[in-house]
Image (spheres, coloured by chain):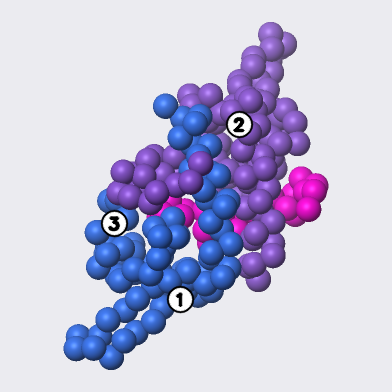
Chain colours: A purple, B blue
Amino acid sequence: MKKINNFEEQCAFQEILKIIGGKWSMSIIFILFSGKKRFSELERTVPHINTRMLVKELKNLVAHKIINREVFATVPPTVEYTLTDKGQNLEPIINDLYNWGVTNLD
Amino acid sequence: MKKINNFEEQCAFQEILKIIGGKWSMSIIFILFSGKKRFSELERTVPHINTRMLVKELKNLVAHKIINREVFATVPPTVEYTLTDKGQNLEPIINDLYNWGVTNLD
């Protein structure tokens, strides 16, 4: 879909970036491409993130239906995160962004 | 290039996002897809950005050779920004991100 670049699209793009544009949200999505993860796994694998930020970002991504949150009735309960179809559709785009960066940034 | 998703790549991806992942940097790049812009034009067209943030982001993007900064000896001097080839290579990726957002986010 050819994009015409006007102020309205600027604002729409900024709304999109607010949801997935942040350093943390894209990192979380990037990790979930390799399959479901528990909270503790995400905490360990998202470089430099703290617990409060991870909770906030996961809430944002669940609210916008980019990731799923599933609670299992173990003791204590286990919480797993997976990408929704919507989230999975980001894989080629984020892979391209990653490859662009590896190629173009020293 | 198929990507294997490990901690090293996580850190590399975060470095990339630090440079172009921010809400402002992607918005500036998005606007420059439609051609060269002066500082004042960018100030008017990047929704909600303030002067200090625009100066900072432009410095970041010039330093990483994603955009060019050209000064013309008019009185007062005119400064124009354009995308480098590196920056231009982001167009299909950022367009895809925009189209994904328009399709998937309410």
In this rendering, does residue A23 appear at all? Answer: yes
Q: Nearer the viewer, residue A82 or A56?
A: A82
Q: Secondary structure at mark 1?
A: strand
Which residues lie in the magenta part? Answer: B1-27
Separation of disc 1 and disc 2 at Cα?
34 Å
Residue position marked by numbered label 1 in the rendering = B68
Q: Residue sitting at 27 percent across and 81 percent down?
A: B78
Q: Residue B101 appears at what percent x and percent y?
A: 48, 36
Q: Residue A103 appears at what percent x and percent y?
A: 69, 65
Residue position marked by numbered label 2 in the rendering = A87
Chain ID, mark 3: B
In this rendering, does residue B28 appear at all? Answer: no
Q: Pointer 1 and pointer 2: residues touching (CB < 8 Å)?
A: no
In the displayed image of the protein, which residue is found farthest to the bottom? Answer: B73
* Badge 3 and badge 2 both on one subunit: no
Residue B96, image quadrant: top right
Q: Residue sitting at 40 percent across and 65 percent down?
A: B35
